[in-house]
Amino acid sequence: MIAIGCDHGGYELKTTVKDYLSQQGITWRDVGCDSADSAADYPDYAKAVTDAILRGECEKGVLLCGTGIGVSIAANRVRGIRAALCHDVFSARQSRWHNDANVLAMGGRVIGTGAALEVLKAFLETEFSNDERHVRRLGKLKNMSNGELSVDFKEENQHGKL
Ligand code: RB5
């Protein structure tokens, strides 16, 4: 199951994405918004998508806003979420293979529907490599989410500079 959310800037693209997923026999859950005609706050929909993933109800998410930037920033504030803003197929593949991204973000005002569906396809069909070096880097990301300080930051702090 794929969780899909958008603000008004991503609404049109969301209808295209849902149609594509249905054609592919992939189940989805639309968490809103429900119209392109009234302004919606992208953090609300990013939260709904990431909640569905963290609860284990959806494996991955797609978030759409005007640029994809707002939803990706919002989603990446959530521990356990790795959102990738991709407008090309290569990045979408790499985001899965190297980064094990669990959310794809795109901008409805940036990318055309044909290209967006190619990006989505690449994102969905690429597995994580499970390569040791990528696993190690994901572990470091996890430590960052847990508030671990960097070495330089800790040293600065010890010298009372902060
Ligand atoms: C809405 O106007 C726009 O700011 C939003 O869709 C998104 O692009 C934000 O990053």
Image (tube, rainbow, N blue to C red):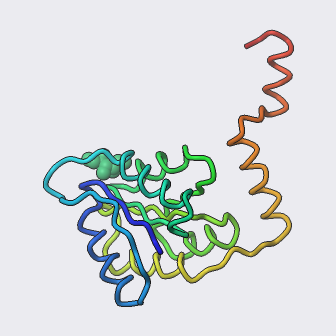
Residue sitting farthest toward the left: 37
Specify whether 143 is left or right of 85: right
Q: Does 53 sit above or below residue 160?
A: below
Specify whether 45 is left or right of 127: left
Looking at the image, which residue is at 73% across and 49% down?
Answer: 142
Residue sitting farthest toward the top: 160
Rendered location of residue 10, percent (x, y): 29, 61
Looking at the image, which residue is at 52% across and 63% down?
Answer: 103
Looking at the image, which residue is at 35% across and 83% down?
Answer: 20
Specify whether 140 is left or right of 1: right
Tell me where residue 3 sits by quadrant. Answer: bottom left
Looking at the image, which residue is at 79% across and 34% down?
Answer: 150
Rendered location of residue 143, percent (x, y): 76, 44
Rendered location of residue 139, percent (x, y): 78, 54
The quadrant of the rendering that contains the C terminus is top right
Specify whether 1 is left or right of 150: left
Q: How many marks?
A: 0
> In front: 150, or 25?
25
> In front: 91, or 26?
26
> In front: 145, or 132?
145
Q: Does 134 sit above or below residue 81?
A: below
Rendered location of residue 51, percent (x, y): 49, 54
Q: Does 54 sit above or below residue 77?
A: below
